[in-house]
Image: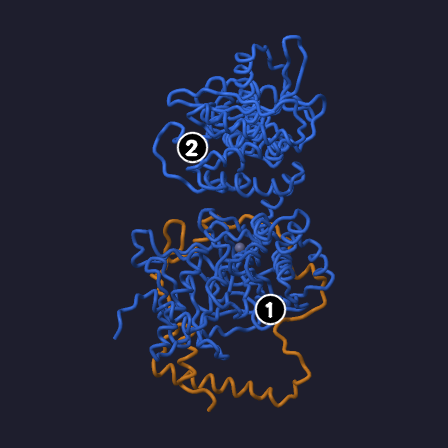
Amino acid sequence: MGATKSTADILEALKEKYEPVIGLEVHVQLLTRSKIFCACSTRFGDPPNTNTCPVCLGLPGALPVLNREAVAKAVKAALALNCRVNRLSRFARKNYFYPDLPKGYQISQFDQPLAEHGWIVIRTGEGPQGGIEKRIGITRLHLEEDAGKSIHDGYPDSYEKTYVDLNRSGVPLAEIVSEPDLRSSEEAYDYLTRLKQILLYLGVSDCNMEEGSLRCDANVSVRPRGQKEFGVKTEVKNLNSFRYLQRALDYEIGRQAQVLDGGGKIEQETRLWNTQTQRTMGMRSKEYAHDYRYFPEPDLLPLVVSEAWQEEIRQTIPELPDAKQRRFIEGYGLSTYDAEVLTATQELAGYYEQVAGKSGDAKLAANWVMVELLGALNAAGKTLAESPVSPEALAGLLELIRDGTVSGKMAKGVFERMFAGGASARAVVAELGLKQITDDDEIRRVVRQVIAANPKQLDQDLGGKKSLEGFFVGQVMKATRGQANPPKVNELLKKEVERAAADIFFTRHNEIHSTAYAFVRNGSPPEPDLIYADKAGKEFGVEVTRTYLNKGEAKFLWDKARKKQGSPQVWTSGVISQPDQVYEGTLLNAVLAKGQKIYSGAPPWLIVVFEYPLGDTSEANMIANSVAAKLKETLSPFAQVWALWQVTNVLTAQYEIFRLT
Amino acid sequence: MRITEKDVLYVAALGNLELDAAETARFVADLDSILSYVEKLNELDTSAVEPMAQVLYDAPETLTWRDDHERPGFPQEKSLANAPERGAGQFKVAKVIER
Ligand SMILES: [Zn+2]
């Protein structure tokens, strides 16, 4: 024999071999003020046996009278579940003995239920389209009364006594029975989720599992895949939480598959899911315990639901999840997944629609509701109704994002404050003095300060060392407490580094050539980037261009210039160990590329920041002369072309300038 | 004989009744004679008559149901008045074993 397989492996193999067939019986409490056959309150949590009367206590002689609202709610559910509502249905007595059933029978419906032949569509599995759609049949929906509540534990004499509270006795229920169309525990989960969602949309039940207003039993069988006939089924009871539903079903499916695989037979029985042991266990039942001896309830007339009444009820059905989802996809351009999340409840959908409408940006609204709002609610353990941020307030924040007052990143901080304090977005922004700085002059001022304060980093940047840009951006954001608009910072940083390079250039030029050129202002396109003037105040334009290297090249050259050892590297245009010709070509190309542009006014100067630091001025001179010779033969829109070149020693950067035309 | 001892014991079990041998025999005879008597009705042709489970009569719909108004129930004391045993505001019964 081979190695021992784990239980999980065995179950997985059995899953391949056997197909589960599942049908669910769901009981939901219908939202009425009074019970189904008497006027006692249906309120949850009242002192025991205070919402009781002769009818629901099962006292002799008391007669039931049907609650019209219970019928209306059941019909509403039936119509929404695509059922055919029977014009005439009948109540029947289901006879069995249990202490919480004082009459000895439950009034239910049997052979003539209120509604039949319905279906709902579930979306099951994962996928970009949100899974596959599958139609699950609904066999019937009928009305019945609930029993009382038996309490088996928690009292000193619980070992020998059961306590009975009849407040629940006679509470109206709709039992919704599905066809055996479900083929996995996941599908069962999806079906129950969808069913609950529809019932909540309809407002016919609060579907509160903890309070027992939604309860679920399952009929489970397995059959070898490919076989047509159903296997023998068991009824699994006590699946009263979504969490346990799947686990209990998986356990029962596995159990049955193992029995069949071992050559055994499934016994038709009722099994209870035990949350402690995480198993289903057969109930000790006599073979004929399930003879309920149904017979028509003589105390109630047949129930007649006229076509007119049906129609009246149909008019009260709101837009259901499916239709809403489609509308969100088509109307707001949302993905299937987003639409599904946002239509999970009517409240969330309503909230979203308000935010989308008021903010004017449906997709931005979807992101903020799904990520920030739901995330914050989840973390705080709050429901949507308890949200400190109203749809109007959230829309207000989105408006501030859209008009550029705050960045998306800042908005998250603002949202946190809004969520914590319930203030409006504008109030938080004002309180924190937060306002995205989008003003060019203000950002430029900060960028200049940062560059001026970091000359070493500027030298490194102009010398071809990469990753300094991030440093400068970080400094600017720090100086503005994160309020500067990042794209603006990037744009202005680029300009101001060029401006700084131009200043370095003219400082050196003024030294060498005894000129007094000075910066005047930034040009505005189609003017050149910078406007300088001579002593007499005569303005001229200056364009700055930079040559760029990749990281490896930059490091190699940086090290080489400082006489550090570095291995020759291969780069795009050749081997750097003999770089002079490559330098020439790169410098020439930079000038020619810039020459393609057309500038207004008098021909400007061009300064090429040549970021290939050299240790030797004569070497640089040679390259510059060679380029200058080549440029003589070309037409140029520039008055003068210069190269600004770092000729470094190890400690500080020095710049040299070379005239190219 | 239409009714057997097995039928009687089956119905007794459903009704939570314990019958001794003498009682069982008596019920076999009694039930059999009752059913034989009712059998007489089969002499009539009722194929065209709808089985009557409820007393049907012409009445406005409103007579067959009530609106959803609640009324105060019994006070707890009164609800429990007939309870053979009670505790914590509830009926107390012998420990229930699921069956
Ligand atoms: Zn009552």
Dot 1 falls on a residue whose secondary structure is loop
Give the label on residue A323, or none. none
Q: Where is residue A640 in the image (x, y as percent from the top left)?
A: 62, 22
The quadrant holding residue A616 is: top left
Residue situated in front as seen by the camera: A215 or A330: A330
Point out the tag, 2 or 1, that comes first from the N-terminus. Answer: 1
Quadrant of the drawing holding the C terminus of chain A: top right
Quadrant of the drawing holding the N terminus of chain A: bottom left
Q: In this view, does B14 lie above or below A64?
A: below
- Chain of residue at mark 2: A
Q: Where is residue A294 in the image (x, y as percent from the top left)?
A: 52, 73
Residue situated in front as seen by the camera: B51 or A369: A369
Can you see residue A105?
yes
The residue sitting at 38% across, 55% down in the picture is A151
Residue situated in front as seen by the camera: A232 or A190: A190
Scheme of colours in the image? by chain
Q: Mark 1 points at which residue?
A: A113
Disc 2 crowd, CA 10 A, few/some/many (<14, 14-19, 20+): many
Q: Colour of chain A?
A: blue
Residue situated in front as seen by the camera: A79 or A356: A356
Q: Name the residue under label 2.
A: A557
B45 to the left or right of B94: right
Q: Identity of the amino acid at label 1?
A: Pro
The alpha-carbon separation of the residues under discs 2 and 1 comes to 88 Å
The residue sitting at 57% across, 55% down in the picture is A30
Q: Chain B is drawn in which colour?
A: orange
Disc 1 crowd, CA 10 A, few/some/many (<14, 14-19, 20+): many
Q: Identity of the amino acid at label 2?
A: Leu
